[in-house]
Image (cartoon, grey):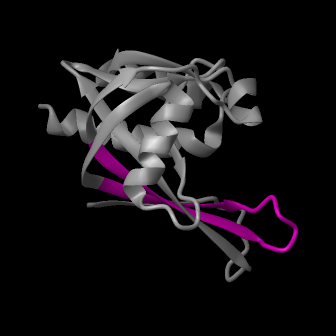
């Protein structure tokens, strides 16, 4: 199921576009979900960009190991996808377009320390188990406050809303 496209209103129509594909994991333990908390208080799903030559499953297992210190995560079926279009940082492009695929995951055990990229370490990303309702409420509050990493808040809120509706 495709949840839609989030397009930054400041984008130039028809601009030069660079695309990226990302995978994200939805891993439940009973009623709690494994998410990454940032220093701003918001939550994001574990995951990231698919590297050349990687399958979606390989990329997601790597991301769980790097971001959460979890090994042995089993990647199940795709749940939803979302496309984001934001201003590109690279001067050769106008638009950065990323499609994120969210997969149902299971298993996994904490087995190592996190291996965060510099920007992830700066955000102090920490794996935590929280309910969908809590993460949704907090992310909405952070978005309304204007702090935090806005580029992923709308995307993560949309997926948390979708999960919340499915659990009713």
Left or right of 72 in this view: 90: right
Residue 154 position, x and y percent, is 50, 43
Q: Residue 79, percent across and down?
A: 26, 52
Closest to the observer, 10 or 55: 55
Location of residue 19 in the rendering, given as x and y in whole percent from the top left corner: 61, 70
Residue 46 appears in the picture as rendered: no
Answer whether residue 119 is visible to the viewer in this image: yes
Residue 95 is one of the magenta-drawn residues: yes
Q: Quadrant of the C terminus?
A: top left
Q: Quadrant of the N terminus?
A: bottom left
View extreme (left): residue = 168
Provide the residue span drawn in magenta: 80-104
- The residue depicted at 31 percent of the width and 25 percent of the height is 132
Secondary structure mainly formed by the magenta segment:
strand
Asked if residue 28 lies left or right of residue 113, the reply is: left
- Total labels drawn: 0
Q: Please tell me in which quadrant of the rendered image residue 162 appears.
A: top left
The image position of residue 45, as x and y in percent, is 45, 36
């Amino acid at each position: 199921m495709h949840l839609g496209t989030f397009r930054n209103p400041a984008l130039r129509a028809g601009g030069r576009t660079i695309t990226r594909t990302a995978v994200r994991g939805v891993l439940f333990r009973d009623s709690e979900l494994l998410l990454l908390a940032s220093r701003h208080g918001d939550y994001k799903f574990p995951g990231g960009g698919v590297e050349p030559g990687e399958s979606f499953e390989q990329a997601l297992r790597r991301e769980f190991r790097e971001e959460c210190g979890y090994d042995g995560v089993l990647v199940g079926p795709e749940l939803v996808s979302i496309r984001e279009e934001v201003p590109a940082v690279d001067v050769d492009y106008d638009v950065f377009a990323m499609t994120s695929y969210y997969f149902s995951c299971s298993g996994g055990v904490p087995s190592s320390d996190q291996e965060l990229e510099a920007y992830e370490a700066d955000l102090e990303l920490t794996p935590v188990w929280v309910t969908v309702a809590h993460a949704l409420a907090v992310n909405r509050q952070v978005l309304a406050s204007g702090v935090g990493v806005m580029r992923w808040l709308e995307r993560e809120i949309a997926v948390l809303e979708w999960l919340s509706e499915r659990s009713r």
